[in-house]
Amino acid sequence: MMPLRFDNRFSKEYLPPSFDSDRARAAFLRLKAAKEEGLPVDWMTLPKDYDKEEFSRILDAAQRIRAQSEVFVVIGIGGSYLGARAAIEFLYGQEHNLSKDAPQIFFAGNSLDPDESAALLDYCRDKEVSINVISKSGTTTEPAVAFRLWRKLLEEKYGEAAKERIFVTTDQRVRPGTLRELAEQKGYECFVVPDGIGGRYSVLSAVGLLPIAVSGADISAMMHGARDAMERYRDFSMENDCVRYAMARTALYESGKSVELFASFHPRMQLFGEWLKQLFGESEGKEHKALYPASVVYSTDLHSMGQYVQEGARVFFETMLEIGAPNTELLIPDDPKNTDGLNFLSGKTLGYVNDKAQEATIAAHAAGNAPVLEVRIDKADEYGFGELVYFFELSVAISGYLIDVNPFDQPGVEFYKRNMFKLLGKPGY
Amino acid sequence: MMPLRFDNRFSKEYLPPSFDSDRARAAFLRLKAAKEEGLPVDWMTLPKDYDKEEFSRILDAAQRIRAQSEVFVVIGIGGSYLGARAAIEFLYGQEHNLSKDAPQIFFAGNSLDPDESAALLDYCRDKEVSINVISKSGTTTEPAVAFRLWRKLLEEKYGEAAKERIFVTTDQRVRPGTLRELAEQKGYECFVVPDGIGGRYSVLSAVGLLPIAVSGADISAMMHGARDAMERYRDFSMENDCVRYAMARTALYESGKSVELFASFHPRMQLFGEWLKQLFGESEGKEHKALYPASVVYSTDLHSMGQYVQEGARVFFETMLEIGAPNTELLIPDDPKNTDGLNFLSGKTLGYVNDKAQEATIAAHAAGNAPVLEVRIDKADEYGFGELVYFFELSVAISGYLIDVNPFDQPGVEFYKRNMFKLLGKPGY
């Protein structure tokens, strides 16, 4: 099996011939020193240092949830749901809920829209349901409101036994007036949102692992992929793919590009694109700096954004997320009449055609002065997901230091929350 | 009921004090003259001039499809599916397939991914299925491949009677070797992809209307909303909201912005955002010009892209898509313990909180030097959807002429198709 690889063959002409290796080394060393500075970088060693006892409780809880549930509802917002959702769609596709082998998994508490909330609550009224609420503080508005609604539903349906169906991932500390305290009083099983890991870096902690395990995925293989990536990218060198990717995207940014377009020919990567947007936008987007992170799914979006990408303003570059082989083979049937002119594809697999479309697109975009970076894994499996996660987490941290921002804070996120609490009349605002 | 309105109160400081009214008038008049130039602008009068006989056949066919189907599969790509999908999610939410009142609706033939295709085919094997294939030429790779697979499934399931379950929306002309000819030979009911309307402007033709009608929506009310908008924006003036919006976004573009971020606090607008990306990206993105169109759904994405929007590079402005009132009221329950500190919201509706979040966000972004434009409709209903469609179609056409591109071609879309056919060895390439 080939490990993850990074390729910049279609963007070389945009890169300065010798991106200053001293600068790259300085950024890398700053990251290596971040732990001593007290920054939340425990994700860097998480694939090795994770809590083995909790990991085994996650596996147990997932088994119970699968056995007792037709529907599993994950309540969380931002980093508390994007990673798990990205993993589940990556492994089982966007239509994973059509399968009969696992509970249906829905993500709630990530908006304030009453219509969607009411529809999902209605749907679940006559189903067997378990929920996982994920919130470090327990006070973030969207998940807290949703948790009130879902707890009410479960208590109406199950009475005292609701506690067997409510799983809480939250702060480790038991303090008065916290979600943790409530959970212990009620007897909900608890998992930990770690202190030393920010939300957008938390998918390989209990935050992501419990929902991913409920989907039926092998979370040990996922940690294995991340651990191999951790070893691979541990040391600074100009051949370290995380360093190379961070340098390439920073050079493109500094050459005047405004947008990094994460693209993939695999619809299963759509939510991974959303996860990347948070990881990059929140880690780098401060002090009026950074690339705007956008995403597309091809070939779908070639028929919508393709015109712009080929011939619109040259303000972006593309980072293509590639997968070696699909999980399914599907043959294109022959049509004796050949009305659609596609008999030259009869008997070929869809995967083959998709790969050729990717190859053609990269060539066309590069020829149209849209630089392309490539990140490739072998297979859409747990191991590959673990590799991707670690690769991008380490890369964005290096990138943040290259443009001299702190990749681990998010000062702007609080701004609207305070405004909203003030408008809503929350005591103290 | 209030008509759609446009507001630029949170971006005025970025606009030149007097955007040249002669320039705006010239763009508007060029659009008005486009018909005589032979350009495909029949969408401009479609809300009045649509084919009434076909419209009534659409209603009939939708009734039959609803009666005979558990699942309805729409096969199309780009403009052949985005409008219908945007409308259905706008009206019934992203989880519309959870409802038991209408057939489940899936969109196929918009990618080449074998895993997703195989999963949906499997799911449908023991369901009652009807399909609608939408393709002007019948030869676009993605829908043509999907149509082969779905026709095969239906013929295996239903034999000769499959023809009662296959609906074809395609070119009007019957020519040898076309999808139209095949449909007539097989006895499939046909609808028309009009000649004078490009794919991205076609949602109010049979292309969009048949799937939308199958969802149970009132397509007459949708045409009514579009017709009222058509009357409202018919004449040039500096108070015409389409002119004002086109001027505002062009002024922001010319002041150095690279990205227009379509934002909404309503998850039901997510696919409408995708529809907008095609409409704007494909209409304007040529000659190395135009804003990069991106989209977000709030408050969800405030917890991912919020940091960037508040404090990242000032390369974008926001166009906020607002809806006056939700379709459902959902009260926030009280919690005697108030662990989450949200009792100040007890008894309030989710819709109220969502509106306040929107208000707070707009103020925070404007204060953070991110200009905001606002487009507001009263209600997420068919009438409002018709208004929105016409408003944005007319606005993008004016915008295109303001930056001096042809808003009705898409020369770059063909580029990758030719590359792909060559790589795949298609005869003649």
Image (spheres, coloured by chain):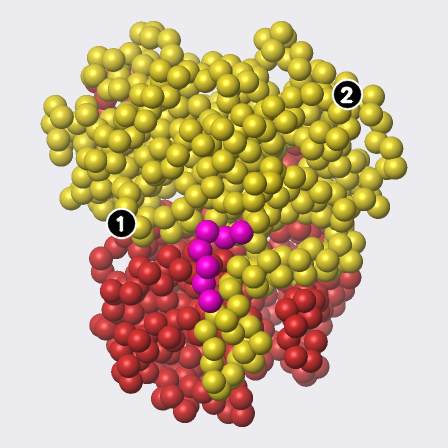
Chain colours: A yellow, B red
- Near-viewer residue (B112 or B352): B112
Identity of the amino acid at label 1?
Lys
The numbered mark at residue A25 is: 2
Residue B190 inside the magenta-drawn segment? no
Disc 1 and disc 2 on one polypeptide chain: yes
Which label was assigned to residue A100? 1
Up-down relation of residue A248 to residue B252 (above or below): above
Residue B234 visible somewhere in the drawing: yes
Q: Position of residue A310 (x, y in %)?
A: 71, 59
Residue lying furthest front: A1
What amino acid does circle 2 point to?
Answer: Arg
Q: Residue furthest right?
A: A17
For residue A312, which quarter of the picture?
Answer: bottom right
Q: Chain of mark 2?
A: A
Of A167 and B226, which appears nearest the observer? A167
**Label 1 SS:** loop
Residue A278 visible? The answer is: no
Looking at the rendering, in which quadrant would you find the C terminus of chain A?
Answer: top left
Where does the magenta region start and end?
A: A325-331
The answer to whether B1 appears left or right of B232 in the picture is left
- Above or below, B40 relative to B381: below
Report the residue at 49% width, 44% height from top. A380
Picture coordinates of residue A72 (x, y %)? 28, 37
Question: Residue B70: x percent and y percent?
Answer: 25, 65
